[in-house]
Image (cartoon, rainbow, N blue to C red):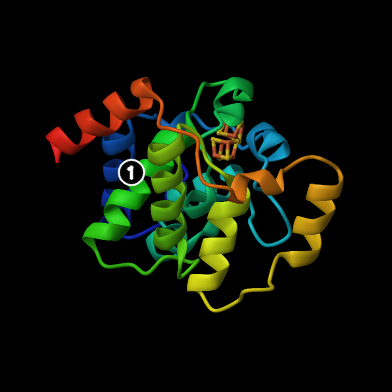
């Protein structure tokens, strides 16, 4: 289902994304099942259906600036519900690589810092310690009280524990092996 109206360079962008992601975006029916179940879709993040529409229309700049793929948490829900089995995470990874190669700034300026803190927490304790990671993130981005109210609500509901702030919790050997394999590849 070819709907491209863009210039040759924009068509090249579509084919590059398809090649790098291994996903046949031309099969997309624009049914919206993916966006309807995507946990990051919101008023400000349009979700995978619109992102794919932008890629199909050859809107390279808009696609690379779309917040959807910056925020994608690789949950796989969209792929599970898609009638033509498009895996959005693979598309998000391809867009990330293209954006990095072309120097496109993230739509969330400090997203790489968050990624670093998230991974450090997993590496150190075998899982992400949400409270610790978010507090470190807010301190380093100079917004120390930013998530205080929702954070307190989550603590009172038992969704996160203040014990996370205590030292301890050794690394998981399986997780440590994954990180050491990644370090070898780099
Ligand atoms: S669920 Fe699949 S076919 Fe439907 S809009 Fe999303 S990617 Fe396209
Ligand atoms: S894999 Fe990404 S795009 Fe797909 S549903 Fe999950 S967060 Fe949304």
Q: Nearer the viewer, residue 63 or 184?
A: 184
Figure check: 69 above or below 37? below
Residue 76, position as x, y percentages in the image:
55, 28
- Closer to the camera, 4 or 151? 151
Residue 139 placement: quadrant: bottom right
| Quarter of the image with the C terminus in it | top left
Q: Residue 133 in the image: x percent, y percent? A: 53, 54
Q: Total number of numbered labels?
A: 1
Q: Secondary structure at mark 1?
A: helix
Label 1 Cα crowd, 10 Å radius (few <14 / some 14-19 / many 20+): many
Q: Is residue 148 left or right of residue 144?
A: right
User: In the image shown, does 21 or 136 lie closer to the viewer?
Assistant: 136
Q: Ligand 1 is located in which of the four quadrants?
A: top right
Residue of label 1 = 94
In the visual, does 171 lie left or right of 184? Answer: right
x and y, in percent, of residue 56 in the image: 45, 47
On the question of residue 1 being in view, the answer is: no
Residue at position x 22%, y 31% from top? 180
Q: Would you identify the image quadrant in which residue 116 lies? A: bottom left
Given the current orientation, which residue lies at the most extreme bottom position? 142
* Residue located at (36% from left, 49% from top): 95
Q: Is residue 179 above or below residue 84?
A: below
Q: Is any atom of residue 173 visible in this view? A: yes
């Amino acid at each position: 289902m070819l709907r491209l109206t863009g210039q040759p360079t924009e068509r090249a962008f579509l084919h590059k994304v398809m090649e790098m992601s291994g996903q046949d975006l031309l099969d997309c029916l624009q049914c919206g099942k993916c966006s309807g179940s995507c946990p990051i879709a919101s008023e400000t993040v349009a979700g995978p259906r619109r992102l794919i529409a932008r890629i199909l229309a050859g809107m390279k700049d808009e696609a690379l600036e779309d917040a959807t793929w910056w925020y994608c948490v690789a949950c796989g829900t969209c792929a599970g519900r898609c009638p033509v089995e498009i895996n959005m995470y693979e598309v998000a990874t391809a867009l990330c690589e293209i954006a990095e190669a072309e120097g496109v700034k993230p739509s969330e300026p400090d997203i790489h810092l968050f990624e670093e803190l998230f991974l450090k927490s997993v590496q150190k304790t075998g899982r992400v310690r949400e409270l610790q990671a978010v507090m470190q993130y807010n301190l380093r981005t100079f917004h120390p009280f930013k998530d205080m109210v929702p954070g307190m609500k989550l603590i009172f509901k038992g969704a996160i524990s203040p014990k996370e702030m205590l030292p301890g919790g050794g690394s998981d050997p399986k997780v440590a092996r994954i990180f050491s394999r990644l370090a070898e590849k780099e």
